[in-house]
Structures are given as C-alpha cells and as structure tokens.
C-alpha cells in the first residue's frame, strides 16, 4: 500500500519496480493486489488486458482503521496498555517521550474544554 499511495496509480510492473532488491515476484505482487481489491482497499481501471491500480482509501484512513483494530483486539481499547507495551518493549528516545507527554497534556486540556462547553449547554 505504501508504494501505491506514493505512486497514486500503477500497474503491477510499476509497483514491482519500486521494491528494493531482491524484488518480489510479479505473481506475488499480483496476488496481494487482488486481495486488496477484494477487500475494497484498492480498485483498478482496465486497459485491454492490463490493469492500473489505485488506492480507494488514504494513508490516514487506513492508519486509523488499523490502529482502532489493534487497540480493540490487542489492548482492550486501553491507551494505558498501549503506552505500557511500548515503554516495556521499545527503547524509546527521551525527546519522543516528552513529545508524547506534551501531546497527551494537550489532548487532556482539549477534552476538559469540550466537557465544560457541554455542561454549559
């Protein structure tokens, strides 16, 4: 998907060219592309016997869907569990941790503001 998002549109050979060596076989890429078409993640336009593929969803939509599924299936929809997992299994950079804490503080402030507005209504 990363390659197809970057290309925006492409034939199997175009997708294959974007891989580093050793490139996966044409048939392997074709099989994966057909699965993505069935899942309605990508679609295609026919040019005779060739098909040009293009994404139906954006990176952001895909990321959101996958993160939602990951949170639900593996972390019980618990942000605390996700943070715990990453803090125990990854060597996190201190700057990244500080940035994440700042983002969480901003999210917390935003949620408090929305809550106050809803109480006034």
Image (cartoon, grey):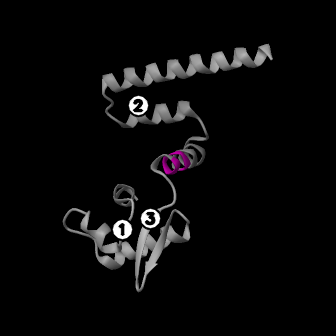
Magenta stretch in the rendered image:
61-65
Q: Residue furthest right?
A: 121
Residue visible at 51% across and 55% down in the picture = 57
Question: On the image, which quarter does residue 11 sit in?
Answer: bottom left
Q: Which residue is mark 1?
A: 10
Question: On the image, which quarter does residue 112 sit in?
Answer: top right
Q: Residues within 10 Å of mark 3 (few under 14, many from 20)?
A: many
Above or below 3: residue 116: above
Residue visible at 43% across and 25% down in the picture = 100
- For the residues labelled 3 and 1, say whether their Cβ atoms are less than 8 Å apart: yes
Question: On the image, which quarter does residue 14 sit in?
Answer: bottom left
Magenta region, main secondary structure: helix
Q: Residues within 10 Å of mark 2 (few under 14, many from 20)?
A: few
Mark 1 or mark 2: name the one nearer the start of the chain: 1
Q: Which residue is mark 3?
A: 54
Quarter holding the N terminus is bottom left
- Disc 2 element: helix
Mark 2 or mark 3: name the one nearer the start of the chain: 3
- Say which of marks 2 and 3 sits in front: 3
Which mark, residue 98? none
**Distance of mark 3 from mark 1, alpha carbons?**
7 Å
Residue 87 counted in the magenta span:
no
């Amino acid at each position: 998907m990363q390659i197809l998002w970057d290309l925006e549109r492409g034939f199997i050979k175009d997708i294959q060219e974007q891989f580093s060596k050793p490139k996966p076989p044409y048939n392997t890429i074709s099989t994966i592309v057909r699965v993505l078409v069935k899942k309605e993640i990508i679609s295609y336009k026919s040019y005779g016997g060739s098909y040009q593929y293009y994404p139906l969803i954006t990176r952001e939509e895909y990321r959101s869907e996958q993160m939602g599924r990951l949170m639900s299936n593996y972390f019980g929809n618990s942000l605390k569990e996700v943070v715990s997992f990453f803090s125990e299994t990854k060597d996190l950079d201190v700057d990244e941790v500080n940035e994440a804490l700042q983002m969480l503080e901003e999210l917390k402030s935003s949620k408090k503001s929305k809550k106050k507005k809803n109480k006034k209504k």
